[in-house]
Structures are given as structure tokens and as C-alpha cells.
Amino acid sequence: MKQTDSIVENVAFNLVKQAVVYLPDDVKASLRKAYAEETSEAGKTQLKTILDNLALAEKHEAPICQDTGTFVFYVKAGADFEGLDCVEEALTNATRKATFEVPLRPNAVHPFTQKNSGDNTGKGIPQVHWELVSGDSLELTVLAKGGGSENVSVLGMLNPSEGLQGLKRLVVDAVIKAGAQPCPPTILGVGVGGGADAALSLAKKALLKPLDEANEEAEIAGLEREILEAANMTGIGPMGLGGKTTVLGVHVDWAFRHPASFPVAVVFNCWAARRASAKINADGSVEYLTHKKRPR
């Protein structure tokens, strides 16, 4: 194994562990705010249970949830970073190692034989999404995606004439239909345009954006606020037991579309919004971006 491969594998292992044990600070702050503002007794009780669970996970360095998810890696690769051809193998090895050492629940199942691989790896797992940029560094982000929130994902192919009203209706209807299944309060990634596959990809990647980071485009930031307000008016509440907070945040991303097609995708993340990022520099030094104060 080359030194670069070893570094990538070690960093990816650390990111998986960080993601499943420690929520990012922005998510914890949002949950605390929801608890402070919740007026429903049932909702407040559920939020307190979630916060207590987070504290126990950190104290014992144990996964936040029994469903440790499947792993999606986002790789922002500098074109001059050495060993790009070995990165995917390193990510697979890191996932396999984390399964036994963290430990993680094995969640990779053959779709036809139902056989579990036993180590969270297999054909197409972990998923790896590449972005090639200039430079000589490598930025890795992992998203641990649970099954309950994934199961309520929605893809709608709207008539372009439905416009923003149709988009908002589709998203809020998805929240209502999902109910308690995605373990609210949730985070919504909304992908618009591009095509069916692109919209879903945009929606899932949007879940990586911190909750305290506003959209750079004022019009879209306003749309996100409208959807958030409408979703929370449903009263579904924490864990579906009623309350003010059904959704913690909404992130919208988009791409140009065909004039005759208006795809809109909604991907849910449960309250355990597990993500972690790090940057590997050309000299082998590592910067942990989302969990700077966490043990590694």
C-alpha cells in the first residue's frame, strides 16, 4: 500500500467513526433550539430523549443510532493529487474496517439474493461521487444514510407550468406522506432540474450543507424558508408525536432543465444527520473540517 493510500484509508475510517458517533455542531445547535422552543409536551419529551442520546453516544463513543446506515462518499479531488486511482479502494477498505472496529451494523444486502455482505461493502457500496477540481489536495465527505429516511424519498416529474407552487406543494405533500417514518425532525434536500437522476443526486448532496449556512441566492433562500414554515405547520412534530418542529432545515440545489421537463426530488435526512469532512493536503497533512475538536 502506498503512503497516500494509507492516509486516505485512515482519514476515511476516522470520518466514518466521527459521523456515526458525533453529530456536527450545527445539527446539535438546531436540535437544542427546537427543544427550547417546543410547546408540545410530547414533542419536547422526544427532543430531550434525542439530546440525551447524543450525550450518551459521545460519552461512550458509540453510534448514535442502531441503523448506522450505508455510506456515501463525496470526493473533491485536486487533479494533481497523487494516487487518485486508488482512492475508491481505500474508501472501501475504510468502510470494511469501520464495520468491525467502531462497530457498525452490516447494512449492505444483495437486492436479489438478500445475502448480507457482512461488512457494509459490495457492488455500488459505498457509493462514491467525484468532483475533479484544480490543485493537489483531496477533500472527503461521508454521509451515513439510514434506511427509514431514504425510504420516503420522492421524485416528481412536474409539468413546467406548475412552477414554484407545484414545487412547494410536492415537497410539503412528501413531508405529510412521510409522517413519522423518517424519524423527524428531519432535514430536507430538494433537487430541482437537470433530469430525473440529476435531481435526486442534487437533493442528496444538498443534505451536506450546514443548517446554519444560508443559500447564496436570495430567491432560493426565501423558497427554503417558505417550505420550512409550511412543513412545520403540519404539526407532525418530533418522531411524529406532534409539535412545532417537523423539519429542522431545507436545502435546495438546482440545475438547468429541458423546457418540457421539470424534475423535483426530495431526499430526507432523519434528525441524526450524520456527515463528516476532512481535507488531505499534498504533504500528507490532514485538516478535519466538521469535527475539529473530536478525538481521532
Image: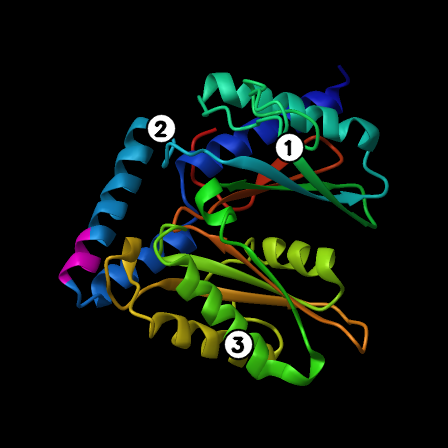
Q: Which residues are magenta?
A: 41-45
Say which element carries label 1.
loop
What is the chief secondary structure element of the magenta stretch?
helix
Instruction: State how far apart marks 1 and 3 are (Cα).
Output: 32 Å
Mark 3 neighbour density, 10 Å: few (under 14) some (14–19) many (20 or more): some
Q: Nearer the viewer, mark 1 or mark 3?
A: 3
Q: Residue at x 70, y 28 (%)?
A: 123
Q: Earlier in the sequence, mark 1 or mark 3?
A: 1
Q: Nearer the viewer, residue 162 or 103?
A: 162
> Residue extending furthest front?
112
The residue that disc 1 covers is 126
Q: Residue at x 40, y 76 (%)?
A: 230
Give, as a three-letter code, the residue at label 1. Pro
Say which element carries label 3.
helix
> Residue extending furthest left?
41
Looking at the picture, does residue 179 appear above or below residue 20?
Answer: below
- Residue 92 percent coordinates (x, y): 66, 25
